[in-house]
Each structure stands twice: as C-alpha cells, then as structure tokens.
Amino acid sequence: MNSEYALAFSAYIGVLGLITFAFYYFKNNKPVDTTASFHDHAEQEFLLGNRSIGSLATAIAAHSSDMSIWLFTGLPGSVYLFGMQKAWLVVGLTIGMYLCWTYVAEKLRINTEKHASYTLSGYFEEHFQDKTGRIRLFSALFALLFSIFYISSGLVGLGITLESVFGMDYHYGILIGLAITILYTLIGGFASIAWCDLFQGLFMVFMIVLVPLYGYTFLENGINSITTIAQLKHISLSIIPATWSELISYLMLAVGWGLGYFGQPHILVNFMGIKDPSSIKQARTIGMIWQLFAICAVLAVGLIGIGMFPESLVNNELVFVAMVQKLFTPLFAGFILCAIIAAALTTIDTQVLVSATVVSQDLYKRFINPNASSRRTLFVSKLGIILVPTLSFLIAFSRSASVYTLVEYAWMGLGSAFGPVVLVALYSKRVTAKKALIGMVVGGSLAALWPLLNTGIPSMI
C-alpha cells in the first residue's frame, strides 16, 4: 500500500474510533431514566437511541445510509459510460426520498412509539393486530434476506475500493471493513451509528463536491471537451429521450427506484429514532439539500470523466477514483478516497443493526423465547451484529456480482415487500392482517425471483 494512502486511511479510521469512544464515554456518564430498569433502558438506547436523535444527525444519517458506495461507483460510472439517461434514476430517487419524508416519516415515528416497536415487523404485527405471528415472521425473513444482499453490496464495493486504491487484497479489504463496522456498532448501537454517519455524511458530500469543481478546471476546452468525446463515443448528454420507448424505459427506471424508498428499513429506522416528530420538516430540508448537492456532484463527475478519460477506463465504476488520482497528490487523494469508505460504512452499519434487531426482536423474542429479559435480547442483538454480516461476507467473498446488481436486487426486494404495507398501515384502516400478509408475500417473493425472468422491467413496477 502507498505510504501516503496508508496514512490517510489510518487517520480516517482513527477519527471514527475517536467519535465512537467519545460517544461511549458520554453514554456511560449521563443520567439514566429511572422510570425504566437499567437493562430496559440499555436495550432502548442500543436499538433505537432511545428515540433521542436530533434533526441534523437524523437527516444526514438517513441520506448517507441511503446513498451507499453506489454514489461513488455505480452512479458516476453509469453516467460516464451511458450519459445523462441515468439522470432519470436520480430524479426518481430525489422525488421518492422527498415523498418518504413528507408522507411516511412523521406518522411512522409517532405510530412506532405508540406501539413500542423497534422494527417494521413489530409495528405491522401490532397495527394489524395479527395474533398468528405470521406477518411478523414473513416480514422478518424478507428483511433478513434482502438486507444480507444489501450488506454484501457494500462489502463488494469496499473490497474493490481498498484493492484498487490502497493496494489491499480484495478479501482482506472486505474483512477489515466488516470488522470496523461491527466494532463501532457493538460499542454504541444506534446513536453511535447516527453520530458516526453525521461525520461521514458531511465528509462525503464535501469531497464529492470538491472533485468535479476542481476537475473541471483541468479540461482543456471546458464543456467542449465533454461534448466532443461524447459525440465520438455516441454517448447522449441529453436527459430528453429520443423515442417514446426510451421515455417509457426511463420512466420505469425512475418510478421503480423512487417507489422503493417506502420499504427500506435502514432508511425508515432513522425516522423512528428522531427525538421530536415536529422536527421532521427541518430534517427533511437538511437531508434534501444534502442529497441534491451529492447527486448533482456525482453526475458532474461522470460527465467530466467523459472529457478527462477519452480512452475508456478498464472499470467504468472507478471513474471517481481515477479522477482523484489524476488531480491530487497521493496524500490528499488518499483522504478524498476515504469518502468512498465512508459511503460503504454508513450503509452497512445501519443495515447490520437493523438486521440484528430483527433477529433479536422479531425472531428470538417473538418466537423462540417470549419471556426473554431485556438483557438477553440485547445480547442476541449483539450476536446478530456479528452473525448477519458474516453471511453477507460469504456472498461478497465470491465477487460474483457487481455493486449495482446487488443494490438493485436488495432495493427492489425491500421496496416490493414492505413499501405497500408501510403505506396502508399508515393511511388505511380497511386492510386486514391477512391482506397485508398476502401483499407482502407476493411482492417479496416476486422481487426475490424477478431476476430469473430477465424482463428488463424493475420488480417494483
């Protein structure tokens, strides 16, 4: 590994360690709510931060955990390779997240507290008054299935980044990334993740905006460099479709991804943990500003990459990496590229904790040991933090699928299984537990099997 890169990587991990241990010290030296037992309080604190996270941390954590490593790899890479047609996906994501903040966040925060629910599965069971436990069981299994694939996408991206940038073996890279995530998640739980994600989210957006702004000045003929190369390579720089079939295809892309927001547990859990439901609007404003800056900058990276690298890169998903290495000194480049690590960790950590909560609350406490103490379920949660990502590690180890493929599969699966059920739970009193279960099973099963059909249509449609 390049010594400058090694220094940057070590410094970044050191900062994360300082944040984690500072939080751990603060948590263990603040007064405990005497209305609850020590272990009950510890469980609430670990799994959902005792619903005490501020609007700034909630906003940045929600959006940074949403974007994942795909923000630095898959998205700029697809723009570099195919042009601005991928902006339709961005439009869908932006509208979808805004609608999720507006119509889901506040109601979900209020209702999950009312039912004392830590997970979507627990909320569904309480809301639909399902005495059989089937809706909780199936929702828990779907959540685990798709989250395991989602976590593996982050590990794949992390391994590729550490291999291509820092010269680290791919398999050692994913193992180190996994160990870091597990460690700071085990130490502090939900609140620790929120504060680490706040730092990492701000770091990410600063770096991803800096690179295209600086990179554009290195284009010999400015915008003409991009348009000339794009014409030679037949890359469209227009967001307007040339045919009706293209328009339909782009709309399906936007709608398919945008609708997925309503069913993403790793995003929705941030809404559940905010301190004051009335601050949701403020958090929405902060989060949407973050997302607009990040997405516009990423589109710019892809476009500038067309002009900067006229000879196609070996791996189009590494256009951001190639640009940083070309523009900056090794030490500064190392710090900037740590933003890719941040993008991976902000998604993986939340998904790991959400999955572990599903294991402890929805499977262990609900079906295996209903009389389990808070101390016991907290132990199972921490055990889940180790076991669930280990399964993801096995998928990532084979390196058989791209980051985009894994993210798409998991995103569409979670959106199809949970999105409709979340909406009817919040807005309809006519849907019964049986109907909700059928919708969830059909949606989740179709999404799980959809890639085998090779239709080219997003499963969310």
Image (cartoon, grey):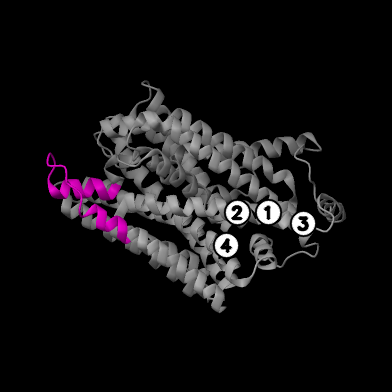
Q: At 79% from the left edge and 45% from the top edge, which residue is drawn?
A: 237
Q: Which residue is mark 2?
A: 208
Residue 271 picture quarter: top left
Q: Which residue is mark 4?
A: 336
Q: At 57% from the left edge and 58% from the top edge, which residue is drawn?
A: 403
Q: Magenta segment, principal secondary structure?
A: helix
Q: Which residue is mark 1?
A: 212
> Mark 4: which secondary structure?
helix
* Residue 131 screen position, x and y as percent: 24, 34
The N terminus, quarter of image: bottom right
- The three-letter code of the residue at mark 3 reads Ile
Above or below, 335 against 231 in this view is: below
> Mark 2: which secondary structure?
helix
Alpha carbon separation for disc pair 2 and 3: 17 Å
Viewer-nearest residue: 174 or 333: 333
- The three-letter code of the residue at mark 4 reads Ile
Q: Which residue is mark 3?
A: 306
